[in-house]
Image (cartoon, coloured by chain):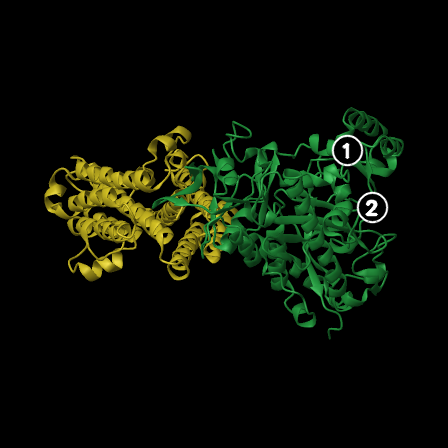
Chain colours: A yellow, B green
Amino acid sequence: MLSRVAERVYWLGRYLERAENSARLLNVYSTLLLDLPRGAKIGWHTLVEITGSRADFDEKYQVTDERSVNRFLIADPKNHSSILNSLSMARENARTTREIIPAEAWEQINNLYLFARENVGKAVTRGPRNQFLQEIISYCQQITGLFAGAMSHNSGYNFIRIARSLERADMTTRIVDVGSVALLPSLAGKSASEQVPEPYTNMIWMSVLRSLSAYQMYRQHVLDRVNGEDVVTFLLQDAQFPRSVVHSLHKLESCLQTLPNNEAALQQLAVTRALAIDATIPQLLQKGLLEYIDELQVEIAGIHARITDTWFLPAVSGQQQS
Amino acid sequence: MRIDWKSYNPGAFYDELISSPGHARKPGRILAKYLGSLKSEDLQQRKAAAELAIKAMGISFTVYSEAGNIDREWPFDIIPRIITETQWRQTSKGLEQRLRALNCFIHDIYNDQKILKDKVVPAELIAKSANFRKECVGMKPRFDVWAHICGTDLIRDTDGRFYVLEDNLRVPSGVSYMLENRQVTKRVFPELFENYNIQPITEYTAQLFDTLAAISPRPLDYPEVVVLTPGIYNSAYFEHSFLAQQMGAELVEGGDLVVEDDCVYMRTINGLSRVDVIYRRIDDLFLDPEVFHPDSVLGVRGLMRAWLKGNVALANAPGAGVADDKVIYTYVPAMIKYYLGEDPILENVPSYLCIDKKQCKYVLENLDKLVVKPANESGGYGMLMGPQASKKERDEFALKIKANPRNYMAQPLIGLSTAPVLGERGAEPRHIDLRPFILQGKSSYVTPGGLTRVAMVKGSYVVNSSQGGGSKDTWIVSEGES
């Protein structure tokens, strides 16, 4: 398989997963924020933090309200990671790799982009927005299904899965990061006004789970009531939940093993996974969680760097994809 | 938007479907009757279905404009064009004959130049040809074939006969649209396929692959065939990708290839991997910065060395364009006699060469009746449509001709045949042409039919997609069907 093509399907996988993750996140927060008291430390701004786009956001918007945040995250052409931009990049990468992905998958990706472009105006108000985001999620799921069911499980397919796993691991660390800042007494500030009142923390942790489609699986796995420690442990370390960091890294490993010259990438993966598995969450919740998550994110970025060095052309990596 | 054939008037032109208002030609009767029976909503709905299919299948082409490159959906008219099998059989033979002669000519020009020595073609024409590549002299490609893939443009005059307008031997495009048009028609009018025996066209990509595989320098069961594209911003990128996909070949860009020890390799996730055959969709002058444009980033440094050493096959071979010059075109009938000892089956459009003093004088005196074409442009650029041009435009063009007579030839304005196109007010006649695709290598192949291009603007003769043309599905049907 051509290195350039490998890189393009890889980005196709990342952008698709990113669009789906963003849609889930927005949907869950739209629902959650209806229930929260005014002035809670969690709010629309939280989404800007999770997506790591504070600087870009501030450049353009004065107020962090529902309208501006949704516009920024769904449709803003200036936001590199907006849903519409992600889908446009996914389409562009699919369009330039049409010769290797199943024709139906390309048609669906193209349809998804056209759907998003035509209906993005409706995403301003809550009701239609929910429907719009649901539609995007189900398109993404269909496309994932088409890859699994209609594409040979060859190197190209593995690059798509690698991309998906990395994007998931990355997104999960972000969601845990921001959830923790808002909710953990050790991090949320000392004064009573900055603490989220008790009845709400439970609800917010549930939303954190839901934003990763993890609530139901969590309930089956953890019998205790929803609490911060178990949620963070589940999302970072559960071996079976598909969006947990450890599970994503397991999947990543099995894909990397099928590729040639994989030593450097596997080594970096081992380092990252050890960091995820060996962490003692209760201890970190008391002290050092944010530093720990930063470290984890750096290692995850390191896997991406090894993959780029090993399999993609330097000339193409120079293109602005991130 | 109902279609009433009684009010459809092709006028003085030969119409492919309707011979006179209300009367369909015999092979088109079922089609015409069927279309006439559809209600306005039905027609609208079929048209919308076609547009949707084209959008969903992502059939597009890129238009260059000042606002950047725009990826546009392929313009398509849903009414198919019908040609009888009997007429096509002859035409197809003529096309195949023509390409055989053209390949003999190219091979001769780069080797013995017998045709020049025998003064059948003036040597001066080659000396001044913009598409003659001195770097190719002495090369002997496999089967002595240089142009493996040819797109020949045919037009039908008012007499209903096909004439050759030009041969495209460099990087002819359009075949993917021919194939996709059929797919779209099958989605839009599935019921018509039950009433007609339509020759299938899907074989093309398999034939193309076989043609390419057969010229591999290494005798392998599975030679590595790649399609070399200038990249995503090329107007025909869709086609490059489509053909690679259909052939199961890698679609490569210049940066994916590298030449080492005069062999071509592609960069893969496993390291370098040898390439045997390159179906290149890049113009000669961009192929290799070592030999041609030194600043070309589309090509591959050393590619010509590898080709001349016989370590990689290029299709079409560099230099093949020497025969698709519009002046050389006028000598093709003579070539057929000279190399093959046969009479040409297909006729050229009558032409006047400006390099000939007498003919040039005629051209200059009759600019208002003629179409004047530069020798080496494609896509309909740089030509003068005499009857539609202003006096000022004609005077300016006359100066260009006088400055460089070798570069121009002229033809009378041919009354291109028409076919019904579905518009806002039902069916209206529009001018069309036909581009069949011909393959030559170990053996020959001609597509049944080809790409019918349509001038979508009333009265216009310009069918190029880059200038707003559209297209139709083209059916070769056997007569006597139920």
* Residue closest to the eye, B215 or B243: B215
Eye-nearest disc, 2 or 1: 1
Residue B413 versus residue A292: which sits nearer the camera? B413
> Can residue B392 be seen in the rendering of this structure?
yes
Residue B303 numbered tag? none
- Above or below, B220 against B389 in this view is below
Left or right: where B109 falls relative to A8: right
- The location of residue B458, given as percent across then percent down, is 78, 47
Which residue is located at x 40 percent, y 57 percent?
A147
Badge 1 local density, few (<14 within 10 Å), some, or many (20+)?
many
Q: Classify residue A1 as left or right of residue B318.
A: left
> Taking B135 as reference, is B10 above or below it?
below
The label shown at residue B414 is: 2
Labels 2 and 1: the sequence-earlier one:
1
- Give the camera-side residue of A246 and A212: A246
Q: Is residue A40 visible?
A: no
* Secondary structure state at the residue bearing disc 2: loop
The three-letter code of the residue at mark 2 reads Ile
**Tag 1 residue:** B408
Q: Chain of mark 2?
A: B
Chain bearing mark 1:
B
Q: Relative to B476, is A229 on the left or the right? A: left
Single out the residue that lies furthest toward the bottom. Answer: B482
Residue at the spot 63% in from the left edge and 54% down from the top edge: B178
Packing grade of label 2 (10 A; few <14, some 14-19, many >=20) is some
Q: CA distance from mark 2 to mark 1?
A: 18 Å
- Kind of residue indicated by mark 1: Tyr
- Report the front residue among B156 and A215: B156
